[in-house]
Amino acid sequence: VDHKFGDAFIMTAYNSEVSGDSEELVNANIADVIAYLKEVGLKFEAKENATIKQEAELKYSKIEDANEKSALVEKEIAFAKDKSTFIEACGRCHDIKYDNFFTPSNHNDLANYLGSVPPDLSM
């Protein structure tokens, strides 16, 4: 990231040559960071899944047929997860106007960084 951020973003060295630490310690530090990120990700995902499920169950709460309700809730959950993944992966740069989603990123900043404004991904 030095080419973009220089001294404003100092990244810890994760190799034994630069850090001076043993290779085992460097590997353990990397494993600790990965484990932490996985744990945080799982907690976030569990919270998001609970919210999505609650919203889907509320949306279909008036349906009396348990099988139909269950199928609709599961379909809604799958769609919401896919949409969330798409927005996290693509929505940082791309607008999706058909779904009334606009990237929170400044278009001028994106154009400066990428060379042009990324296209709208409406299908």
Image (cartoon, rainbow, N blue to C red):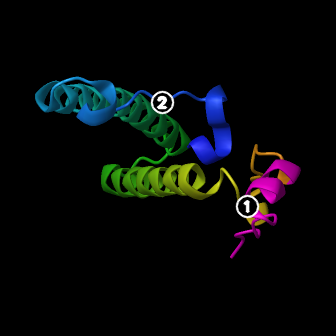
Q: Is residue 58 left or right of residue 15?
A: right
Residue 101 image label: none
43 to the left or right of 108: left
Residue 75 position in % (x across, y down): 42, 58
Label 1: which residue?
Answer: 114
Q: Residue 110 colored magenta?
A: yes
Circle 1 packing at 10 Å, graded few (<14), some (14-19), many (20+), is few
Residue at the image position 15 percent from the left and 32 percent from the top: 23
Residue 103 is at least partly visible in this image = yes
Q: Amino acid at mark 1?
A: Leu
Give 65 or 8, whichever is nearer the viewer: 8
> Which comes before the other along the chain, label 1 or label 2?
2
Whether residue 15 is visible: no
Give the residue displayed 50% in from the left and 45% down from the top.
60
The magenta region covers: 108-123
Which numbered disc covers residue 11? 2
Where residue 103 appears, as percent x and y from the top left, is 75, 50
Q: Where residue 72 sits in the image (x, y, percent)?
A: 43, 56
Q: What amino acid is found at the position of numbered circle 2 in the picture?
A: Met
Q: Secondary structure at mark 2?
A: loop
**What is the CA distance from the residue labelled 1 to the residue labelled 2?**
22 Å
| Residue situated furthest left in the rendering | 24
Residue closest to the far bottom: 123
Q: Is residue 63 left or right of residue 112?
A: left
Q: Secondary structure under badge 1?
A: helix
Provide residue 56's location: percent of width, then percent of height: 49, 43
Quadrant in the rendering for residue 37: top left
* 89 vs 61: above or below: below
* Residue sitting nearer the eye, 20 or 62: 20
